């Protein structure tokens, strides 16, 4: 297998699924009508409700949904089960489930005056469903924040050539906001200045790197400065680990690449003999940096920081995807080789590594079903998409007919990002999750620029682009999280209504969660809750369609599959946490306490989902006739 066939498959899947299935549902079931007034036009206030061009809205929705999920999920899945199962799920998921969730959540919110899914559930299912869903969403956002912050802090701690570019991004975000909204400068000029400065900083990070005789990487001037900072922070407590963790998947970025002998070397943060990851003070340093960055994005006026940072991030991501796509298309055709003399484009990762159904005492259990379907948390389907689409995108839709290109189109766009991640990790073949992605992207950019951009620069851009993609969405997560917390307990605890108090509480809870167990379990717990959120959003869509006497089958079948899959996946993840951490005699202290906390959280999510599912079933039975009768009625109309 090579990258060319992945490009061909992506084009075919997107064309067929969009034109032959999505358009049919839009026309025959939802019946989008350009003449029907949307909430954006009826309640235009210039703040939440604002009619927006579908071209601009596409960019907004795509950047709001594309974060760590379509990158980390395929990378982790390819490492555990192989690239073929990951590819099959991505193709089937986006074609029959993913676009359905994104598009339907937006359209149902549009048809209900721009209300959120929880408000719609109050109306069409039951009052208590709204309350339970509200609680579910907060803890889901907590897992989301924990997963994102955990992987970002690990990358910044492990890659000293990356932080400088992110620091410059923050500065350029503040500058861009000032230039655009205060100084009223030309948009094109502002874009060139801030994007060029950010890209230059990403290039300066790895500049001057070289390999020692033993293969060790020696940092250049910028990277060396970051290394010195990390060492100074670690020396504050005598270079002692704050806690030790274990990641059986090898996906944590702090785990080094295997050497020429195929074995991973020991580093300051990794003990090769025991396989334990040492959480050092520099890891906390970069977590604090991420919290400060996100604090600015969550509390400053959106034009001051969050919006310009997202704008810069979009262009960096766009450039990365385009150059990598060109490389994936041309490398197999031109026979281009990387710096080591290997052909670029050929897959180095096995198509199928394991189905994972065998259970070993004391070890994590990773069966293909259901764990693959929650490990790839985006790119195939995501609950975050439905949440942000119903609250934000639906209130900006100018015409109902824009819902399909914006909602479904953005989901297919994220599908291409997930494929890029899968391709990158498959041609790299070795290393930790983030390392394999960046290494693969570096090769593709080298090929896409026909050798003009060195692999080391392309690799740094891959790391930087990944961090940018995740970090820009993490701001939005904390912004939504503080609002959710304020609305949830603000009446009972008035100080929580203050945005700074609610943001601080959200970040402290996230800090505690990140320091509780192995990264992959936190990711899979987030993945399970994320996909369960998707199932619950599809449940709301299904019941609403039923109440409107429309055929709900296209949403009902995906909902049932995701509902039972994610419930079982949450149970498996809780079991893995118990076996490998909570009941592991080698583990103690905070990791064990955190494992039990996540197990309790898993039980809470399961119970909440069961209540919502039961209420949904009762509501479904209250409405309308059978799907077959509805199909006949729609066919006649």
Image: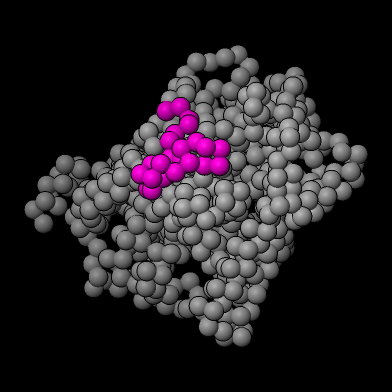
- Dominant SS in magenta: loop
Q: Nearest the camera: 276 or 476?
A: 276
Work out whether 94 lies above or below 406.
Answer: above
Is 246 positioned to the left or the right of 231 in the image? Answer: left
Q: Position of residue 126 (x, y in %)?
A: 41, 49
Q: Position of residue 495 (x, y in %)?
A: 72, 63
Residue found at the far top of this picture: 361
Instruction: Give left or right: position of 524 versus 382.
Output: right
Front in this rendered view, residue 475 or 251: 251
Q: Is residue 442 above or below residue 371?
A: below
Q: State the residue at coordinates (56%, 42%).
A: 339
Q: Quadrant of the N terminus?
A: top left
Is 198 part of what is drawn in magenta? no
Quadrant including the C terminus: bottom left
Could you tell me if residue 622 is visible in this image? no
Residue 411 rendering spot, x and y as whole percentages: 38, 52
Q: What range of the chain is rendered magenta?
A: 329-351
The residue sitting at 63% across, 58% down in the picture is 202
**Residue 229 visible here:** yes
């Amino acid at each position: 297998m090579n990258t060319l066939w992945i490009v061909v498959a992506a084009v075919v899947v997107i064309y067929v699924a969009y034109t032959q299935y999505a358009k049919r549902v839009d026309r025959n079931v939802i019946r989008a009508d350009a003449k029907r007034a949307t909430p954006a036009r009826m309640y235009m206030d210039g703040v939440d409700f604002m009619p927006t061009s579908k071209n601009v809205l596409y960019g907004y929705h795509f950047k709001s949904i594309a974060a760590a999920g379509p990158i980390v999920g395929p990378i982790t899945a390819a490492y555990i089960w192989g690239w073929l199962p990951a590819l099959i799920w991505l193709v089937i998921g986006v074609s029959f489930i993913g676009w359905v969730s994104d598009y339907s959540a937006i359209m149902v919110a549009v048809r209900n005056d721009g209300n959120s899914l929880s408000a719609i559930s109050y109306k069409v299912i039951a009052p208590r469903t709204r309350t339970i869903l509200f609680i579910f969403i907060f803890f889901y956002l907590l897992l989301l924040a924990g997963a994102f912050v955990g992987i970002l802090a690990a990358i910044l701690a492990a890659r000293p050539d990356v932080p400088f570019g992110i620091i410059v991004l923050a500065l350029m975000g503040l500058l861009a906001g000032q230039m655009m909204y205060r100084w009223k400068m030309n948009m094109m000029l502002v874009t060139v200045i801030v994007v060029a400065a950010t890209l230059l900083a990403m290039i300066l990070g790895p500049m001057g790197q070289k390999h020692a005789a033993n293969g060790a990487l020696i940092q250049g001037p910028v990277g060396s400065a970051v290394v010195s900072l990390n060492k100074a922070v670690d020396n504050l407590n005598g270079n002692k680990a704050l806690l030790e963790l274990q990641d059986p998947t090898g996906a944590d970025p702090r785990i080094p690449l295997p050497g020429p002998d195929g074995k991973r070397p020991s580093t300051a943060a990794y003990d090769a003999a025991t396989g334990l990851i040492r959480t050092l003070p520099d890891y906390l340093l970069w977590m604090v940096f991420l919290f400060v960055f996100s604090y600015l994005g969550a509390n400053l006026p959106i034009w001051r920081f969050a919006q310009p940072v997202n704008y810069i991030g979009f262009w960096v991501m766009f450039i990365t995807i385009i150059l990598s796509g060109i490389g994936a298309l041309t490398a197999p055709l031109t026979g281009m080789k990387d710096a080591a003399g290997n052909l670029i484009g050929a897959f180095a990762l096995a198509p199928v590594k394991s189905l994972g159904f065998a259970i070993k005492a004391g070890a994590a259990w990773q069966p293909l079903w259901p764990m693959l379907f929650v490990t790839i948390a985006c790119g195939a389907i995501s609950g975050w998409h439905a949440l942000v689409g119903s609250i934000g995108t639906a209130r900006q839709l100018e015409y109902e007919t824009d819902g399909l290109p914006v909602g479904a189109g953005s989901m297919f766009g994220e599908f291409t990002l997930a494929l890029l991640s899968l391709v990158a990790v498959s041609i790299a073949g070795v290393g930790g999750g983030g390392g394999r992605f960046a290494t693969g992207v570096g090769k593709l950019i080298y090929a896409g620029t026909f050798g003009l951009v060195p692999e080391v620069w392309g690799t740094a851009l891959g790391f930087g682009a990944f961090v940018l993609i995740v970090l820009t969405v993490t701001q939005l997560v904390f912004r939504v999280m503080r609002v959710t917390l304020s609305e949830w307990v603000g009446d009972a605890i008035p100080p929580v209504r203050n945005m700074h108090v609610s943001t601080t509480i959200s970040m402290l809870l996230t800090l505690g969660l990140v320091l509780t167990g192995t990264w992959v379990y936190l990711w899979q717990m987030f993945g399970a809750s994320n996909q369960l959120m998707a199932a619950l959003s599809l449940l709301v869509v299904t019941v609403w369609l039923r109440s409107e006497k429309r055929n709900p089958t296209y949403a009902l079948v995906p909902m049932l599959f995701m509902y039972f899959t994610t419930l079982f996946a949450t149970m498996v993840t809780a079991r893995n946490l118990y076996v490998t951490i909570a009941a592991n005699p080698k583990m103690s202290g905070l990791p064990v306490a955190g494992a039990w906390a996540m197990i309790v959280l898993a039980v809470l999510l399961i119970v909440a989902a069961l209540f919502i599912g039961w209420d949904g079933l009762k509501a479904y039975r209250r409405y309308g006739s059978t799907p077959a009768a509805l199909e006949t009625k729609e066919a006649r109309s």
